[in-house]
Image (cartoon, rainbow, N blue to C red):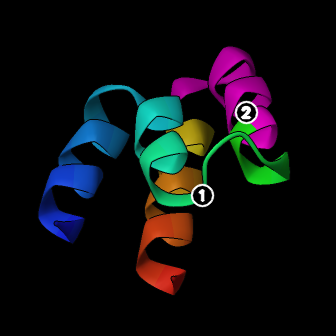
Amino acid sequence: MDVIRIIFAIILPPVGVFLQVGLGLHFWLNILLTILGYIPGIIHAVWIIARR
């Protein structure tokens, strides 16, 4: 299941984070990072998925 989340994290980072943690702080932080720059959003999403 983590492979699917990581694929979502690369294509659309907030979706990968949402699948991992739901609508929490990390989800909204990831949306902000993705808006500010796509790469920081991907890094944050993969970090959240790999950490949990």
Q: Secondary structure at mark 1?
A: helix
**On screen, residue 23 above or below 32:** below
Considering depth in this image, is 25 or 6 the residue closer to the camera? Answer: 25
What residue sits 75% from the left and 20% below the top? 36
Asked which quadrant contains residue 21, the reply is bottom right
Residue type (three-letter) at the residue carrying disc 2: Leu
Residue type (three-letter) at the residue carrying disc 1: Val
Considering depth in this image, is 15 or 30 the residue closer to the camera? Answer: 15
What residue sits 44% from the left and 68% below the top? 49
Provide residue 31's location: percent of width, then percent of height. 69, 26
Q: Which residue is mark 1?
A: 21
Asked which quadrant contains residue 6, the reply is bottom left
> Marks 2 and 1: which is nearer the front?
1
Boundaries of the magenta span: 28-38
What residue sits 15% from the left and 53% below the top? 4
Q: Residues within 10 Å of mark 1 (few under 14, many from 20)?
A: some
Q: Is residue 9 left or right of residue 20?
A: left
Does the stretch in magenta take in 29? yes
Q: What number is the disc on residue 9?
A: none
Q: How many marks?
A: 2
Determine the main secondary structure of the stretch shown in magenta. helix
Provide residue 1's location: percent of width, then percent of height. 16, 66
**On screen, residue 43 above or below 9:** below
| Spatial separation of the CA atoms under disc 2 and disc 1 | 16 Å
Q: Is residue 28 left or right of residue 19?
A: right
Provide residue 29's location: percent of width, then percent of height. 80, 40
Q: Secondary structure at mark 2?
A: helix
Considering depth in this image, is 43 or 51 the residue closer to the camera? Answer: 51
- The residue furthest front is 22
Provide residue 43's location: percent of width, then percent of height. 52, 54
Q: Which residue is mark 2?
A: 33
What residue sits 42% from the left and 78% below the top? 50
